[in-house]
Structure formats: structure tokens, C-alpha cells
Amino acid sequence: MAKELICMTKKELSNYDIINNLINRKINGTDASKQIGVSVRHVKRLKKKVINDGAEGLIHQGRGQSGNRRLDDKIIVKAKKFLKEKYYDFGPTLACEKLEENHNIKTNKETVRQLMINLELWKVKSKKKNKHWHVWRARRDNYGEMQQFDGSYHPWLEDKAEEMCLLLSVDDATGKITYAKFDYNEGVEAVFKFWLEYIDKNGFPLSVYLDKFSTYKVNHKNAVDNKELITQFQRATRQVGIELITAHSPQAKGRVERMFETLQDRLVKEMRLANINIIEQANEFLIEYIPKFNAKFAVSPNRRKDLHKKVTKQTKDQLPQIFSIQKQRKVNNDYTIRFENDYLQLEQEQPTTVYKKDTIIMEKHLDGSTKINLNNKYLNYKVLPDRPKKEIDIKLPAITTRRQSNYIPPANHPWRNPFIFSNKLKVEQRVKQGS
């Protein structure tokens, strides 16, 4: 007669020995409960099962049976089909969200992860060892107290071979994306446009945490001792009262760096599903996408205060001037100015007096216009078609607010009287000396 094999775990075998000792009265119920780690009442239940069913009574009743939350085979086949066709390069978490959102397949990310591993769409990642030790920094307390800002070059539109730059600002206290915009580079004009739109939407943040990219900081060795070596962005933020904090490593501003890593995975795939092909469509897509993203990933700050400074009307009118590319130039002897391979001729009538060799500020605004600033007043000028002839001794000593008059006073004009009287006295003195 064949014997029936019973498969038991080590824990179940150990519990069987303890219950047998209890049945044989080697120990009492209190001792058995301490050894197994359950209540005395449960020990009595186990004792009754062993007496009635033997060792088999300690085996879990659900062993070998399918779980109550197991997906139906038809749903698994359907999920695998969508994973292969649409979400082959998605991560398990995002794929799980899309299966529920677009196909009404409700499951958890670990189930999707196992399905993707079986389909060889996902590889198990080994844990990385930390090479460097970074000290954790606590979040700021209030919204708007500090913004982490950076730009990321990436093929955001998969169909396009060229890379775009995503300019991104993340609030340190909440982890919210406060503003984001696609542009072709991380240059001065692109950054200025970004912050003008940010300020119009949110106001002035107290500080901005960023890296040492050339747009934001002069990295020349002399800039350590000479604080006057500043970038256009540093000058503009000083004028509006925003403090710039420079990070010495990417890990220091880890919130925005980690945000880029998430968006390079999620945002690229979301724009692919939405058939986004050009940068204008991508920026419109961000307007709807960012609130949903923030609702899912943002955290509550320690204090619920918004520390953004409001923009006054006077400051708002000055913003185009502040966020313009400004460079110093000298007024030449013929009242021309050389700027960007063009010669600009100052007109004779000006809102303020202009002298030769005056230092003026050339402002290149974001709308493409060029303005000449002297004493906070804009000078009138015209662009010369050709290079002017060099003239050192020009008749005008200065350009004033009035046009110079050609009027010549007559000989009997009171202005000439002192000179006439002085000449008569000189003649009379010579006559007396001769006599």
C-alpha cells in the first residue's frame, strides 16, 4: 500500500513537534503558546486539528489554491497584448497606470512587473552601491521660499532627431513643478523668457538653486576675487531681489535632477501617446500635464504659506528692461555707436545731454528691439547703412536737448559791449603812453 507524502515547511514541522509534546503532556498550553508565538486559544485549535487530522492538520488550507485576487486568464492575455504592442518600453508603474486609465485593467505594479519580466520587456535591476556619501538636506518650510531650476537636453519628441531643452523649476518645499517650458537651448534669451513667464504667473521667489552653467555663473578663476564679474542672469536677478544659490554638485539640487529622470521616462511616452510632434504642441501639452503630475507626486509643506513676492505695477513695467541683454559701449567722436556689426547714429535732439566718450548701456530686448540707455533715458538713433567716415574734430561739443541756433548777434548787441569797451580802454592807454 503506497504511503501518502505530506509536504510541510520547517515552521510547520517545528509546530508539529511542539503540539505533540503538548498532547503527551510534556509541556502545558502556556509553554506551547510561547514557543510557537501565538495565543493559548490558538494552541488549543492546533491541538484539536492534530488529534483529528494528524500532521496534515497544521498545513495551511490555502496551499496549492489560486489566490482570491488572482487576475482572470483572459485579462492576463489582454494585458500582455497591450504591453507588447503599446507599452513595450514603459516602466511597470507607468504601464500599470496606463492599463487602468486606457483599458480598464485594474491590477498592481508588481503584477505588471512580473508580466513584463516574463515577456522580457523589463530586466531586474541590481541595487547600486553608493560611491559617495551625501548629507541629506531638509526641505524648505514654505512654498516659494526656494526654487530648484535647471535645463535638460533630451530627445523629448522621439520622432525628431534633434534634442530640445526642457527648462524646469521645482519648488523645494512641496516638490511641485512651478513652471516648465520647452526651448531649443539654455541660453540667456531662453532663460529670460522662462523667468518672465514664471514671474507673471507666480511672482518673485525668494531664492533660486541652480548649477554653474555659463548662463548663470562666471566660472573664470578671477571671478572668485572680483565680484563684479557677473552674468546677465545674475545682474537681472539682483535687480529684482532674487537670491541665487549655486550648487557644487548635481546631488545638491537633487529634486530637479530626479524630476528630470522621471519626466524623461513618463513625459516622453505621454507625448508619444498624444501624437505631439512640434515644440509648440509640446508646450501646450505641458499646461494640462503639469497639474495632473503635481496632484500625483507633490507633498505637503511644513507651513502653508506662499512666500512669492507680488509684482507691483512699477516693477512690471521695468521687467522688459531688467530682463534684457545689456552691454556697455562708448559714444564715438562723431556721435556714433558700434554694436553688433552695426553703426548707430545718434540724432541731434535727445532727452538728455550726450557728450563724446560717454558710457552708455545697449539693451537688446527679448522682442528684438535695441535701445540705448543713458541716465535711465532712451536715446534717439538711426542705423547707418554704411560705415561712417572717421571724423575727430566734429563741430558739436555735445548733443543737447535743444537744436543749436545759427543766430549771430549784431555789433551793437549788449553781449558785445564789454568787448567794445575793453578795446576802447586799450586804445586810450596806448595814446597816453605814446604822448
Image (tube, rainbow, N blue to C red):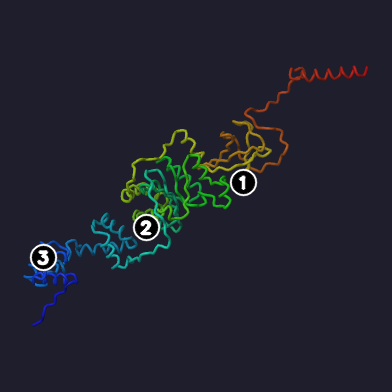
x, y percent for residue 43 = 11, 65
Q: Earlier in the sequence, mark 2 or mark 3?
A: 3
Sort mark 1 into few (<14), some (14-19) or many (20+) by Cα contacts within 10 Å: few
Q: Earlier in the sequence, mark 1 or mark 2?
A: 2
Residue 404: quarter of image: top right
Residue drawn 11% across and 78% down? Answer: 4
Relative height, residue 420 to residue 328 (above, below)? above
Q: Residue at label 2?
A: 265
x, y percent for residue 85 = 31, 63
Image-based side of 359 in relation to 162, left or right? right
Secondary structure of the residue carrying tag 3 is helix
Q: Kindly identify which numbered label has been placed on residue 341.
A: 1
Which is in the foreground here, disc 2 or disc 3? Answer: 3
Relative height, residue 230 to residue 19 (above, below)? above
Q: Amino acid at mark 1?
A: Asn
Residues at marks 2 and 3 touching, judged by CB atoms closer than 8 Å? no
Q: Amino acid at mark 2?
A: Asp
- Can residue 367 be seen in the rendering of this structure? no
Secondary structure of the residue carrying tag 1 is loop
Sort mark 3 into few (<14), some (14-19) or many (20+) by Cα contacts within 10 Å: some
Residues at marks 3 and 1 touching, judged by CB atoms closer than 8 Å? no
Residue that lies at the very extreme toward the right in this rendered image: 435
For the N terminus, the image quarter is bottom left
Q: Residue at label 3?
A: 29
